[in-house]
Image (cartoon, helix red, strand yellow):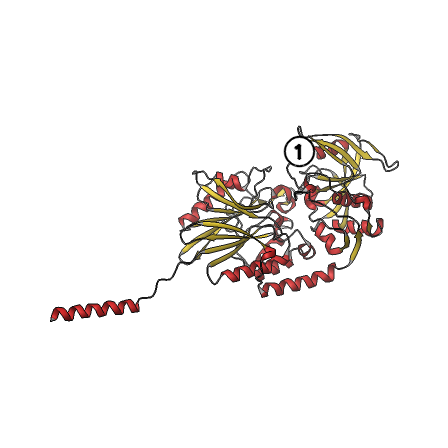
Amino acid sequence: MKRIIFFITALLLAHFSVISAKPKQPQKSIVILYENDVHCAIEGYQKFAGLRDAIADTAFVAIVSNGDYVQGGTAGAISRGQYIADIMRSVGYDAITLGNHEFDYPVAHTTRLLKHIGAPVVCANFYETGKKKSIYAPYIIKKFGKTKVAFVGAVTPTALYTETSAFYAGDTQKYMLHEEDCYILLQKAISQARKKGAKYVVVLSHLGEDPNRTDVDSHGLVRNTTGIDIVLDGHTHSVILHDTVMNAAGQLVIVTETGTKFKNIGKLLITPDGRLITELIPTKTVTQVNERVKATTDSVEMLMHELTQRVVCHSDVHLKILDAQGKQQVRMGETNLGDLVCDAYRIVTGADIALANGGGIRTEKFAGDLTYGDIADILPYDNNVWIVEATGETIVELLRKNTSFLPIEDGSFPQVSGVRFTARVSDHSVFDVEILDKATNQYEPIDLNRTYTISTIDYCVTGGGFYDILKECKVVNRLDRLYRDVLVDYLENNLGGHISNDYAEPQGRIRIIK
């Protein structure tokens, strides 16, 4: 009898323990939404945040940026980045890193913008000169359920050369990007994150995939390190769903990039069983909208409209910076928009020649009315036009150096006015350089010993564009006028508000041969 009672009691206890036990919860996936090189395409942010909101019900979700957000379009240009900071603050980022264009402003100004955004900034290679600790945290760790994910940040060291003025006070270098030991610093950050329990290491990279003068890029980062799971890349505006690169231990690491200006929203899915799956979602197909971000964007657009709605001119032609394949022709060959911009510099200032770095001409425009906002889209940065003196020998060297990366795109590729030349790709030589004679309106061979006046932007003189070749040249006039306002002057007062078919095609100033 006792045995029967014991057996029944055991059954009852087992029954009640089953009833009282909590059902095991299914493990959630982790989703990381990422963007890069938005360059003030503000209409995409509300969808970016909206997609996050839609995912948050079924998965852990984070939202990150891989750099180049405060400049590159009208919203950044007319507010010195403040409108972008306002919108990004409303999005609520989990982590962001720096792009080279965050250094278009003095570091103190960008620091204020970043504080306003309010997101953790990660960057392992940005230092104050002489200091042993990076200005921003090299990484942060976020916990999703019980899983720790580290976000490590890196910015291209080429910013030291392309945005030089932000790093110097006079001749004194105040900040550095650790060009030579960039990979070492990133490996240190990765290893520390692993020691602190990070199961996954995600690099927020603004390094890009293209060869550059610093020999630091995203693929090189992977090849020279261990411990990275995936690189969310930026800088080169590439559309990469899923590349794999072998790391120093012989393991494959994913590299992905969304393009630019919210062409796509990147989505990284980390499944409960450890698989990493990337997806690029065309932003135009996203229907979800975050209402708070939309309200901020709408407010910014209203402010912008008041400042930018004035029609400056009518264009009969498509003003181009891209080739038929969508590559940046303005960074590797003559374009009609490059001709127009340089004509404005030369004719408005009266200089002998004009030069524009291709990377400073940002957006092409279709035929039709062009507003001041359109001009700010084309020339969005806080650059003024200056006039310098340079010898013919210096000009030839500038043209040679700044075409020497052909056929690779280069932001310092020179658009020109008042000068024409031939560049040969095979030996990186420049010849048949001719200058337009103001009196005869005919081209004459350049005189290597003569001093000519050059109209260009301060960025290309103080260090950044043109690989510092104009840095030692005498400045004869610092116009207190933004480069876009000089273009507006030319369009209104010299062209009478009408861009004719004279600018339908490039005008044959730059000849490139193999």
Q: How many marks?
A: 1
Residue 481, above or below 354: below
Q: Nearer the viewer, residue 287 or 270?
A: 287
Q: Position of residue 497 (x, y in %)?
A: 83, 52
Residue 30, above or below 434: below
Residue at the location (59% across, 63% down)? 293
In which quadrant will I find the C terminus?
Answer: top right
- Horizontally, residue 248 falls left or right of residue 97, namely left
Q: Give the class, few, some or many, for how many residues have Cα within 10 Å of label 1's Cα (few <14, many ≥20).
A: many
Q: Nearer the viewer, residue 246 or 308?
A: 246
The residue at the far left in this view is 1
In which quadrant will I find the N terminus?
Answer: bottom left
- Horizontally, residue 245 falls left or right of residue 235, namely left
Q: Position of residue 10 (x, y in %)?
A: 20, 68
Q: Position of residue 420 (x, y in %)?
A: 77, 35
Of helix, strand and loop, which one carries label 1?
loop
Quarter of the image for residue 42 reads: bottom right
Query: Can residue 131 be seen?
Result: no
The residue at the far top in this view is 427
Quarter of the image for residue 83 reads: bottom right
Q: Position of residue 409 (x, y in %)?
A: 65, 39
The residue at the far right in this view is 439
Residue 441, above or below 496: above
Query: Can residue 373 be seen?
Result: yes
Residue located beneath label 1 in the image: 404
Residue type highlighted by circle 1 = Ser
Quarter of the image for residue 322 reads: top right
